[in-house]
Image: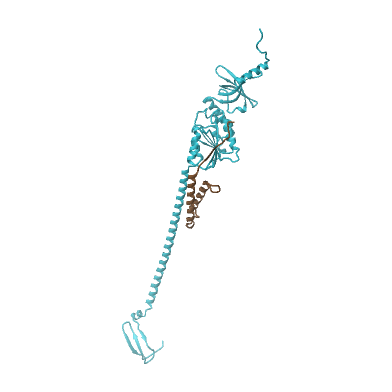
Amino acid sequence: MSKGSKTITEKLAELGELTAWFESDEFTLEAALDKFAEAEKLAKEIDDNLAELKNKITVLKTDFSK
Amino acid sequence: MANELPLLSVSQFTALINQTLEYAYPAVEVEGEVASFKVNQGKFVFFDLKDAESSVGCFMMVFNLRQPIEDGMKVIVRARPKLTPWGKFSLTVEQIRPSGEGSLKKSYELLKAKLENEGLFALERKRSLPRMPEHIAVISSTQAAGYGDFMKIIDARWGGMKVDVAHVQVQGEAASDQMIRALEYVNQQQELPEVIVMIRGGGSADDLSAFNDELLVRTVAASRVPVLTGIGHEVDVSLVDLAADVRASTPSNAAELLVPDRSDIRRYVQQSLRQILAATDTGIDQVRRDNSLLLQRAFERVEDAHELYVRELASRQSLLAAYNPRRALERGYAIVRGEAKVGAVIGIETSDTLMQAEVTDVKRK
């Protein structure tokens, strides 16, 4: 993921907010179409990000025996 | 015969013995049972180390005493033999550790009670771990099986983390100090990790004893960064485990507690989409129902209005029928047409007859 783009945590939070909106009293059919498209896009991005995730492992050079 | 031996003063003799000892035995490890243990002025530790046949006096500074010791415990000391200026042979102890399961257990219980009393293990001190850490530090031996298991599992479950590994010994005399240095190093970094993970696989009580070192336990308790431990097996609970923020039962369990599983996240995302679809379906159904109801009401109103008109029409028809002149004729009346003057010819209509007549007389009522 590039700098400046959202992290997976942020995207999951956003998806959670969208899901909550659909189950709230603010739900309207008129707004639902756009919000559903947004949720689908987020879901795809999260899936892509999950597939790309790799850990960066660095063994420290410091000698802790001294 | 000439005297071949050098003539020494007492001090010179003592110095010579100590030089010889330093050269021949710069360090020794001796195992024995502790007796007459005492601490003077809070700084100086004295005790005897004995076995069935011999005993030797020991001296050390209290800051080197990393685990509680008491009379009767079997210990191993790392020391330098020395002859004191007043002729006493003793061991100057640099390191001391309990030896054998019984002594290890005793020392563990003593230190646990002491630190628990100080509040080091209190639940209120425990910090929770971030759900999806982005930067962690691992303190372990990179050659240990436990480290390998841990790294394999975090790679399988998750990614995108920066993992700094501090390679240290995880058993033996030097282990505690190395782990302390690593903890202090990590805690002094400008960019602190979100979690420090301390890992080692299973082993004997002696193998794991480094994790019961008082100084190490205190360093863990004082860490600015939350500490997760995965030490030994499920049944092994070291004092470092008790001081840590989160204790995992094994290195593998530590990986599971630290990071989520990608497949769990994927399931959550799919579940969210299903919930959204279900909510949309419910919304559409509700609108359909609302529209049906409105249509039905409108239809009912039209029906009601129609019924009203039909009744009204029937009523007016009845009224019209009542005013129909034919009805008067049927009741026996007649319609007279013409002028009401003498000599005029008038027409007379009854219900079944038409007549003509001449007016013979007219009187006003």
Which image quadrant: the C terminus of chain B? bottom left
Asked whether residue B119 appears in the rendered view, the answer is: no
Determine the residue located farthest toward the top in the rendered image: B1
* Position of residue B241 measured from the top left corner of the image (x, y, whole percent): 54, 34
Q: Would residue B346 be found to the left or right of residue B166 on screen? A: left
Q: B349 and A23: which one is in front?
A: A23
Q: How is the image coloured?
A: by chain
Give the colour chain B carries in the figure: cyan
Looking at the picture, how far across and down is residue B95, in whole percent? 59, 26
The total number of labels drawn is: 0
Residue B56 at x, y percent in the picture: 59, 19
Figure check: B210 above or below B25: below
From this viewpoint, which residue is outermost toward the bottom?
A: B343
Image quadrant occupied by the N terminus of chain B:
top right
Residue B236 rendering spot, x and y as whole percentages: 50, 31
Quadrant of residue B76 within the rendered picture: top right
Residue in view at x 43 percent, y 64 percent: B298
Does residue B131 appear left or right of residue B11 in this picture? left
Residue B155, above or below B293: above
Outermost residue on the left side: it is B352
**Up/down of A15 relative to B217, above or below:** below
Q: With respect to residue B202, does B273 lie above or below?
A: below
Which residue lies at the image location 45% right of the left edge and 55% below the top edge?
A: B283
Q: Report if residue B262 is visible in the image.
A: yes
Looking at the picture, tell me which residue is in the foreground, B192 or B117: B192
Question: Which residue is more in the foreground, B244 or B194?
Answer: B194
Task: Give the colour in which the image draws chain A.
Answer: brown
